[in-house]
Every structure is written in C-alpha cells, then in structure tokens.
Image (cartoon, rainbow, N blue to C red):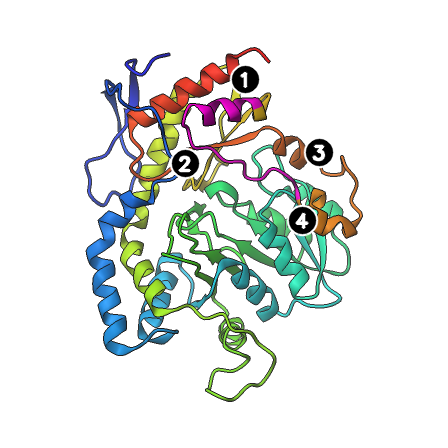
Amino acid sequence: MTATTSRTAEQTSDPMPTTRSTPVTDTVTDLTVTAVPFVDLALQNAQVAEAVAAGFERVLSTNGFVLGPEVARFEEAFAAYCGVSEVVGVGNGTDALEIALASAGVGPGDEVIVPANTFVATAEAVVRVGADLVLADCDDDFLISPASVADRASRRTRAVIAVHLYGQVAPVEELRDALGAGVLVVEDAAQAQGATRRGVRAGALGDVAATSFYPGKNLGAYGDAGALMTSSAVVADQARALRNHGGIVRYEHLEIGRNSRLDGLQAAVLSAKLPLLDRWNLERRCAAERYDELLAGVVGIRTPRTLPGNEHVHHLYVVRVRDRDQVLDRLQDAGIGTGIHYPAPIHQMPAFAHLGYRKGEFPAAERASGEILSLPMFPGITAAQQERVADVLVEAVRWPS
C-alpha cells in the first residue's frame, strides 16, 4: 500500500450539506505527507475567525463577560439545535454532569449506573453528588450494555448515565426497557454533538443531558465550557441556581451551589461555530467512510461499527488491533498522531479502587482497553493524510511482534 494508490474517497462540494456525500474517485498523488496530527483545530478556527471577532466585540460592548446576553443567545440557539426547550451553560463538561444529576434530584442513598469504559469525569460526577457509583460493562460497539445494566440494577438505582461514546448515541430506549419506569436516563453527550438516534438528536433522548465544549470536541470553545440540556423547566431552573452559588437573583442564595457559569467570550465562539457543526460532522463521516475503505479486509484491524438507527458524528475513529502498544509506538515514530480512549476502565483506576470490583468483572471493557487505538480525525483531514495513516497502520499491524 503506497501513498500514490488510487482509492475511492468521499467528497462534497455543498458548502452547507445536510445529507451524506456521494462517493467519487479520488487519486491521491501527494507524496509530501509524512506527519499527520491527531487533531488540527486551526482549520476550524480559520473558518470562524470573523464571526468570533464579531462575537467578542458584542461581549466587549455590553460587558457581558459572565453569563449575560451572549450566553443567553447561545443557550437559545443550542436548545433549538438539540430539540430541547432548555439549555443551561456552565463552566465545563464535568460540572455539567454533576449539576445535571443534582438538578434531577440524584444524591446520597441513590445508585447511578455508569459504563466502565468512559472518561473519568462521568464517574466523578456521580461521586461528587454523593450517590453510589455502580459500573456496567459495554457491548462490542463500546456503548453501555443494556443487559449488563439490567444485571447491575437494584431497588436503589436512581439513574443510568448513557455515554454516547466516540460520536454515536447509546441505545437509550433499550436502557429504559432494562430499568423500567422511575429510573432517570442521563445522557453524557460530550462526544456526540449533532449525533442522532432514530432521528432524535443527542441531548433530547434522556431526562437530562450534559455536554462538554472542550476545544477538541465536535463543537468546541476556546477553553473550558459546558452545558446541560433538558425539556424540564424544573430541572433547568434548579441547574441555573446551582451554577450560580445557589441562587438566580443576585445575593439571594437559597441553597449551597457552586460557581460554574459559562462566560460570554466562550459563548461567542460557540455561537460562531454552531452553524457549521452539521457540515463539520458530515466531513467527519466522510473521513470515517474513507478509513473504512482504506482498512477494509485488513487482517488484524477491526474498524468501528455504527448501530442501526444511529447517525454517527465520529468524534473519534477508533479501531481495534492486536499488540496495540507496539502498533501505537510505530505510528508515533512515523509522526502519526494517535490516542487511546481510554487505557483503563474506571474500576482499574486507583481513585476507584474502593469500589471493590475485581479484574475480569467487566470483560468487554477490559478487553477493549488493551486493543483500542484512535486515529487522526477532524474536519478537513485530507485523503492524502488518511492514506498516510492507513499505510503506516497496516505496516505496523503486519510487523512481526
């Protein structure tokens, strides 16, 4: 496999496409591509520079640096995009999860089920609201297993956190069926902005949802930022109080809250980027399809699967390989940016040793943690860059141990 091989690729000429692109033949002839970054944010930032500057000017002219009109403007736009009635902007995605749980009434004495294979923030949020953390295994597609959730549920189960991992939505309706009425479904949608399941966007499927706008997300700010989404006015009002020292009116503090308010400058960035999110997500899907074609049939590489009914937004493109650490080293030596999301399940982290879970208790999550490898993925990644990644990956997989 060489960088000059002719392959089928996905392209689009529509400046704001809303549907999947049509395959065309793309002959890659760029021999200059060597290093490939894991993420290239400069491409996106250049597209929104003027709109961001205009947003910053609005913030400066109104002095709305913390909350304020720019935040309200973004909250309204993002609520319409997600298909919910309420969005509450907060300081970061971890706070969004914690405030979402607390606003929905989850606290001491409750159990919350979380997938073992997730970023630590999902588990942290449960502990920080005083609830008991219960882990469940994942399925082969990396999403939380409804069967495992059913096995782990008890009379104290108050909520399950459906993590929309890598850019596709967890089977929320199956989780509801597994747990029955009275158990909250909380979405961790930090990696799935714009993703849908059966036509409904992430953030509108559960009782309350949380997302992160960390710069590398599909919709990213220029620093930390987050939000929770819900169609419950009661939950939203509680969240607005909790994010602002326990009150909505200044100097009236009805309960113990925290300081986690979205600032106007980050909201201006998000407002500038939101109109481009669908196009950027389409570019990610096109790139994922190109990877699928480049890696199809290669022994030792398992490409990701999209669940029926899901529209994936490919925050990450995660393959499974044997001898993962050796493969990763060879990719990095060749200048290919890579990642592992995530190298250890929650129960194998020292911070959660007190939970008492044993090695082997979550076999799917544990097996995945030793095989998963995230390849470069971002809007604007070129066919030549993907060719280079595929060439090096295939060579690394075939290299003798």
Q: Earlier in the sequence, mark 1 or mark 4?
A: 4
Q: Earlier in the sequence, mark 3 or mark 1?
A: 1
| Amino acid on which disc 3 is placed | Pro
Kind of element beneath mark 3: helix
Q: Earlier in the sequence, mark 4 or mark 2?
A: 2
Tag of residue 38: 2
The residue at which mark 3 appears reads as: 363
Residue 279 location, quadrant: top left
Residue 267 visible (yes or no): yes
Tag of residue 178: 4
Q: CA distance from mark 2 to mark 3?
A: 28 Å
- Residue range in magenta is 326-345
- Residue 243 placement (x, y as % from top left): 51, 73
Residue placed at 32% from the left, 40% from the top?
A: 379
Q: Nearer the viewer, residue 62 or 227?
A: 62
State which mark lies toward you, 4 or 2.
2
